[in-house]
Image (tube, rainbow, N blue to C red):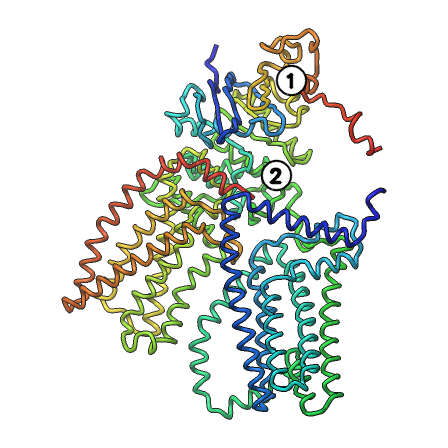
Amino acid sequence: MAGLDAGLAAQLRAIGIVRWRLFVNSLRSIRGRLNLVSRGLAALLIVGAAIGGATTLGAVAWGMVNEHQLQWLSVPFWMIFFFWQLFPVMATAFTQNIDASSLLRFPLSYPGYFLVRLVYGALDIATALGLTWSAGVLIGISAADLRLAPWALLAVASFVVFNLALARMVFVWIEHWLSTRRSREIMGVLFLLMMICFQVAGPVLGRYSRWPAPHKLTVLAKLLPLVRSLPPGLAAGLVTKATQGQHSSAIFSAVLLAAYTAGALWVLHLRLHGQYRGEGASVGERPKTAGPVYGGASVRRGWRLPLLPGPVSAVYEKELRYFSRSGPMLFTLVMPVIMVFVLWGGRRALMGQQTNFVFPVGAAYCLLVMTNIVYNSFGGDGGGIQFFLFSPISFRQIAAAKNLAQLTVLALDVSILWLGVRLVFQPPRLRVLAFTFAWLLFATPINFTAGNLLSIYSPKRIDYAVFGRQRASESTILISLALQLILLGMGALSLGIARHYHSLWAATGFLSALALPSITAYFIFLSRISGIALSRRDVLTAELCKA
Amino acid sequence: MDSPAIISEGLTRRFGDFTAVQDVNLSVAPGQFYGFLGPNGAGKSTTIKMLTGLMAPTSGRMQILGLDLATHLIEVKRQIGVVPEGMALFGRLTGSEYLNFAGRMYGLGRRTTAKRAAELLDFMELSQQPKTLITDYSHGMQKKLAMAAAVIHGPKVLFLDEPFEGVDAVASGTLKTMLQRMASGGVTIFLTSHVLEIVERLCTHVGIINQGKLVAQGSLDELRSGVVAGTTNQAIEKMTLEEFFLHTVGGNRSAAQELSWLG
């Protein structure tokens, strides 16, 4: 039993050393070193955000105390609270998380485990910024009125402890819920809805701003008691009551804040204790399908595309099935509708009465959002790339089938966009339609050519089922962005030509002329793609088959 | 005598300074059930990847069914079936969709593919829950599905990389039944495995690779009686496959003097 008497301190030190070794070992690869550089740049931004945020919030708090506008003191607390709780969720919720409960195989006591989980990962960006900004508020209040410093310290300290406990509680429960693929997908859909809400927030707020003031005040009056009884409101209330000399009420606010903290810790304990007893983070995972059933299998026939070989139809069918089961793909499909709403909301600011250009702008956006798929078209296949490599079909056919599927999605997107524009604005005029299709005819083959090449030269495995941190490689992103700028620039140049000749048809002619070499280049590169893929098969399998 | 179904001459693969496979000369006759053995990191998977076109060799020549892999890659691929290390599945398809896809990729018609897919799903006991995505299959089910996809077009040569790894006894029995049926039907089977009992029971011929070099090759009887070129030694006569394997790769390390604290 030697070794079992190792103390908690030694275990915590061992965990720290492991984390450090993981970091050091990650620097062995070029990618790891590049990540360190990008982390360094991110750290500079964080320091800027910390100092800037703390100064701003401190100044706001100072102004409120100085101007005796303490009824608004909860605003900075609410801002800190939302950032502290929402940012980690946004940053981590949509990825597969490491199951930290793996520490349980070691002889760790429950208090030790609780402590490790409370501290483990708590030193993140949100905590660092939340702490700094809270300190800014504390300094602001204290600078405005030094007598309030002890009360402000009590309020801010209680608020900070509450946020730390709540953030860990939220994180471990989200980690628990996201342990299954299905729940990750559900969260993905929620994320999608949230994105839509953000996109349409502009128009909605625009409408709301036209409400008469008494209506707004009624809504605010109803919300006020609720706002005051929640932790950010309590922290602000503590200071406000101390200013008014109501010290017992101020202490009562602190007690309520402590109760909220205890509640968060208790809910955290429920999850961690469940894990400690052996439930594990993946307790929610449905057991894998098992058990034989004999006979009765009926398999419907695959799709058949006219004039195309069977393997091309098979890849096309597979691609569309993948798209239809992918959250990001659904996001791509609804993007045109969102686009119509966004343009509708900001039509005055963006283009005045020039609603003619809603359709071309929307179509360009449709093509832009597809780059994620086009420029890393084997990313979603993962280990399936091996099947492509050992099956008797050339990569030329595979790439063509994939492009065909992507073209189908683009066509669907543009059709939805056309319908949306027709309903919300007015039917696009013929010359606008012709201009748009000429640009698409020019830009799409270029995107597909570059996409096919980068998909082979710089592949990166992605999971279509999850959101966030699902990006192509850095080089792919850079090249695709540069290319989009060039393509949009050519569109703008063609508009300049149209202005010069006082006819949009001139721009259409110019883009149509450009489309010819673009399509030719596409077919030239497509005919060479098999050889390129064959020479790069080691990289393809190494990058896409890794777990 | 028929020309070999699988031939490799001087097959070599280097990764920078590291030589994973060095000068491997394989010869597998048609209809042979060939087990390719070796310790971890010996070069088994690298060899099978090169033989199936998944990886380019640094040097050397390969022929499958008399066709040179360098010049007739597509023709070779039509004749072979592969279950690679990672199983090459598309996780977001259902089992029947994947088999449909696989059959058509090998050039089968829609009707034939659908018929064979249904039969294979039944045989592999995978016909339950037809809407379940492959990603939600158990490991054993994924192995069976990968095997079904590898045979749907009726290959003449089958390459299997660790087909029994992580598979339970029931699934393993199903796979063995199918492989034995194929072998008796004249299909050449080339498999790698760590499980020597399985190789001993299923295979007629064995090749052993160690540190990238082919150190023994021959029929099971030849290996056991020590008559294989380079291994002839009176001392190893009438060994079991496991004893021969350990003798060949130098795995007779005793733990008796080490780790004494384990009790």
Q: Quadrant of the C terminus of chain A?
A: top right
> Residue A224: image x %, image y %?
61, 86
In the picture, the disc for residue B49 is none
- Report the front residue among A492 and A413: A492
Single out the mark in the foreground, 1 or 2: 1
State the residue at coordinates (70%, 18%): B243
Against A293, residue A447 (above or below) is below
In the depicted structure, whether residue B18 falls above or below residue A497: above
CA gap between label 1 and label 2 equals: 39 Å
> Which class describes the residues within 10 Å of circle 1: few (<14), some (14-19), or many (20+)?
some
Image spot of residue A57 (x, y percent): 56, 78
Residue with the mark numbered 1? B248
Amino acid at dot 1: Thr
SS assignment at label 1 = helix
Q: Looking at the image, which is closer to me, A431 or A116?
A: A116
Q: Position of residue A347 (x, y in %)?
A: 34, 76
Residue ID at (38%, 46%): A454
Where is residue B6 drawn, in percent x and y?
Answer: 48, 20
Residue A540 vertical placement versus A357 (above, below)? above
Q: Quadrant of residue B196?
A: top right
The residue beneath circle 2 is: B125
Q: Is residue A253 visible?
A: yes
Residue flagged by tag 2: what amino acid is it? Glu
Q: Which is more N-terminal, label 2 or label 1? A: 2
